[in-house]
Structures are given as structure tokens and as C-alpha cells.
Image (cartoon, grey):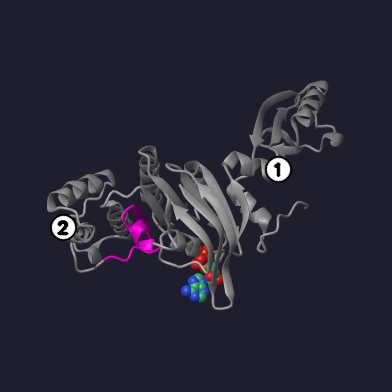
Amino acid sequence: MIEARDLVKRYGDFVALDGVSFDCLTAECFGVIGHNGAGKTTLLKCLAGLVQPTSGSLVVDGIDVLADPVALKERLGYLSEESRLYETMTVPDYLGFFGELYGLSRETVVERQERLLGALGLDHGNKRCAELSKGMKRKVAIARSLIHDPSLLVYDEPTSGLDPMTSRYIADYLAELRGRGKTIVLSAHNLYQVEALCDHVLILSKGRCAAFGSMDELRSRFGPPTYRVHFSLPAGRSPDPSLAAVVDGAGFSVEAASIEEMNTLTAAVAAEGGRVERVESHSPSLEEMLVALGGNGALRTGP
Ligand code: ADP
């Protein structure tokens, strides 16, 4: 479990994190999102013990990370935004090197490396790291972060810049890791992936927590679902102007802000001799939430 309280990080006079607090439960996937410069990488580096917060407290599985960052290392797998590898090493040499750093036996390294490369679908062909594609490098970096079998994974943009297939493969693998009990904290610009993977999401804005919660909690905070009623009318008929319907494909559609409004609309459609073809509900996505928060992190509630 991660308990972050009132984390502040200043770079000189600049405040990159401004009093961030949250809890992340064991074996959950925790997403950190926000606009560029919001403080995501800084927060992840604090969690990984790579950046010392200016003030606040951070406890991971009972370890006070600020007082004892080294104690965290053996249970932490960190993936930085870029997969910087040792370019002249082959993949097995590279993973073997990190395995040794963690004090693993040669047999354990070989067994884990084969399992990880197999699970990640990485056919490295004994190439040197410099000769790998971007997606392959990312997979090697992920394998490196897992070689010592850590319980906490802190991943900065794990799928950024990858082709959709590789990105999907890695996202599926992260879901599998969470299923096996790993705690995963990740930042990502791919908000659909965050929605699909994460149990809780922290939205950072200018170093502050703009919103935090499960997807359901965030959705209810950012507004109730809306409904779009798709309907057809007898040939040649147009909807009553009071419905404010729009032409939609071969028929018409109209938006309802609540279930009650939807019921009123479907009754009005029936009264006009029309037929409701389908109703779609729409809840705010993370992307819409970020847009609603705007550049200054203030929740825009009006038009
Ligand atoms: P994000 O990951 O959300 O894009 P970062 O955590 O990388 O945001 O950066 C947050 C802010 O802190 C940015 O304005 C960035 O310029 C600043 N910052 C990050 N690292 C440093 C540093 N080492 N020195 C000075 N400013 C930094």
C-alpha cells in the first residue's frame, strides 16, 4: 500500500508538486494523468525514490521512502519514460547484468528472463540492444523492471510512442501482472488504456490533485450520463421543432440530460407516430474530464 501525504516538490522556486495526497491499495492499478508539465513524472520519481520530495510523507508497504529510499529498491520495478538500454549488450546480457545487480543466481536470471521474454512476445534474435525496434526496446525495459520480481511497478508512459499492436500487448500484460497481485502505478497519455486498466485515477494539474477516485467516482463528479435517443418517423415527416432533434443517418436523434427527459422524449416520438430505434448512454471519458479541467486545472462547469 502507498500512502502519500501532502507531497511537495520544488525545483528551485518552481513548485512541481503542490501538496499531493492519495492512497494506493496493494494489487491495484493506479493511474496518474494530467496535461504536460502537470507533475506526473516528478510524482512517479518520488514514488520510485529517485527524487526527494521537498516535504510531505510517503510510505510504501510500511517503508518510509523519504527516510530509506534504498529499502524500497528490491520491491520496486521502475520504468522511465524512455527505454534507455546499454546499447552494446545483447538482451540476455543486459537482463543478466541487472539480475546480478539484484543479487540473483545465474539460474534464476536465465529462468526469469526466458519467462519474461516469452510473456512479452519478444523475439530478440540475440541482437544488441541498439539494433532493436522501439517497441522491442520498451519490452526489454519492462523485462528489466521485472527481473527481480518486484511487488510494486512504477511505470512512466509504458506504451507511449508504440504502434497499436505493441501498445495493446503491453497493456494486456500489465492487466495480467495486476491480476497476479502486482501493484502498478502508471502515467499515460493513452487515456483509454488508463480507463480500461486502472482501479483509481489521480488527475494532476499544475502539481495539484485536481480530481481523484475510481472511474465511477470520477464520472459522477464530472457529470451524470447523458442519453442520445435515435428514432425514425414515417416517410416524409419531420420532427416537431420543439424536440430539437437533428438528422442522424437515415433517421433523427436528440440528446436527453436525464432518464426522465429521455422518457419524455421517447413519449413525444411515439406521439408523432415515430419509432425509437435505440438509446445510447454516454458517461464522461477521462479525455473529456481533462478538457473540462482546462489548462489551469479549474473545473469548468458552464458552457
Ligand atoms: P509531466 O510528467 O506531467 O509532464 P514533470 O513532472 O515532468 O511533468 O514536470 C513538472 C514540472 O516540473 C514542469 O514544469 C517541468 O519543467 C518541471 N521540472 C521537472 N523536472 C525538473 C528539474 N529537474 N528541474 C527543474 N524543473 C523541473
Q: SS at mark 2? A: loop
Q: Which residue is mark 1?
A: 223
Q: Residue at x 81, y 32 (%)?
A: 239
Q: Which residue is mark 2?
A: 126
> Looking at the picture, does residue 89 appear above or below residue 242?
below
* Res. 159 visible in picture: no
Specify start and end residues of the magenta stretch as a single range.
69-85
Residue 53 as seen in the image, left or right of residue 207: left
Residue 260 horizontal/vertical position (percent): 78, 28
Disc 2 or 1, which lies upstream in sequence? 2
Does the magenta-highlighted stretch encompass residue 72?
yes
> Looking at the picture, does residue 28 appear above or below residue 7?
above
* Res. 230 visible in picture: yes
Nearest to the observer: residue 143 or residue 137:
143
- The amino acid type found where label 1 is placed reads Gly
Q: Is mark 1 within 8 Å of ligand 1?
A: no
Residue 117 horizontal/vertical position (percent): 24, 49
Q: Mark 1 packing: few (<14 Cα in 10 Å), some, or many (20+)?
A: few
Residue 82 as seen in the image, left or right of residue 215: left
Find out whether the residues at labels 2 and 1 contact each other: C-beta distance under 8 Å.
Answer: no
> Looking at the picture, does residue 71 appear above or below residue 273?
below
Q: Residue at x 75, y 39 (%)?
A: 246
